[in-house]
Amino acid sequence: MDRDRQLLRHFLAAIAYRTQKAVRGAPQHYPAFSAGNRTRTPAEIVRHMASLMGYVTTHFLGGSYPVKPDPLPTFAAEVARFHEMLQRVGDLLSAGTPLRDITTEQLLQGPFADTMTHVGQLAMLRRLADSPVAPENFIYADIRADRLNAEQPPPARPDKDWPEAPE
């Protein structure tokens, strides 16, 4: 596997890790939490993230993927679908499947960066839902390119003191 694909797989693993950090231990009301003004709920964001990864597969395999896939019955199912799609993209990268009509740079600047932006939205919505996620130094996070599933390790270096901590 060339260096571009190795880095893209590592970026996918960072997405997987940060997604789990944002949703792990979320309160029951979180998946349907609305910040108002027509913003997506966490469940809608995760569904959109799965759609983005489905869109990525079309740049390897052709075909299409729905912009708005049908909602699944639970938030856990939405998160599982997202990780399945993430794994599928990781497998395509590992297998050396050629990209069609776009470059690895475009893959990174487009759907991969968009997905990471949505992960940040999930974390922000946790804070707005009165359940903030503890900060950590991500440089030391145990992120591995072969781990794109929901089974992600706990923070390696979480911040001990953070002013936003719930009481």
Image: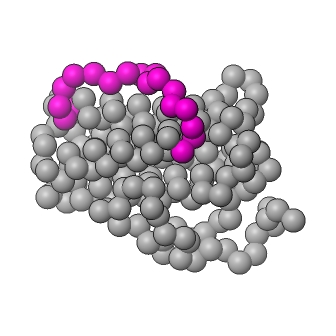
Image location of residue 32, percent across then percent down: 68, 35
Report whether 147 appears left or right of 33. left
Comparing 78 with 90, the one in front is: 78
- Marks counted in the figure total 0
Q: Is residue 93 magenta?
A: no
**Residue 85 pos. (x, y %):** 35, 41
Which image quarter: residue 31? top right
Which colouring convention does the figure follow?
one colour
Residue under the image location 53 percent in, 56 percent down:
20
- Residue 119: x percent and y percent? 54, 46
Q: Can residue 114 be seen in this view?
A: no
Q: Please tell me which residue lies in front, 15 or 74.
A: 74
Residue sitting at 80 percent across and 50 percent down?
Answer: 130
Split into 4 quadrants, where in the image is the N terminus?
A: bottom left
**Residue nearer the viewer, 54 or 100:** 54
The magenta segment:
59-76
View extreme (front): residue: 73
| Residue 11 as seen in the image, left or right of residue 75 | left
Compared to residue 100, the image places residue 132 above or below, namely below
Q: Is residue 72 magenta?
A: yes
Compared across the picture, whether 18 is left or right of 5 comes to right
Residue sitting at x 73%, y 56%: 132
Q: From where the camera sits, is residue 26 visible?
A: yes
From the top left corner, tell me how far across and down residue 112 is, in percent.
Answer: 38, 43
> Looking at the rendering, in which quadrant would you find the C terminus?
bottom right
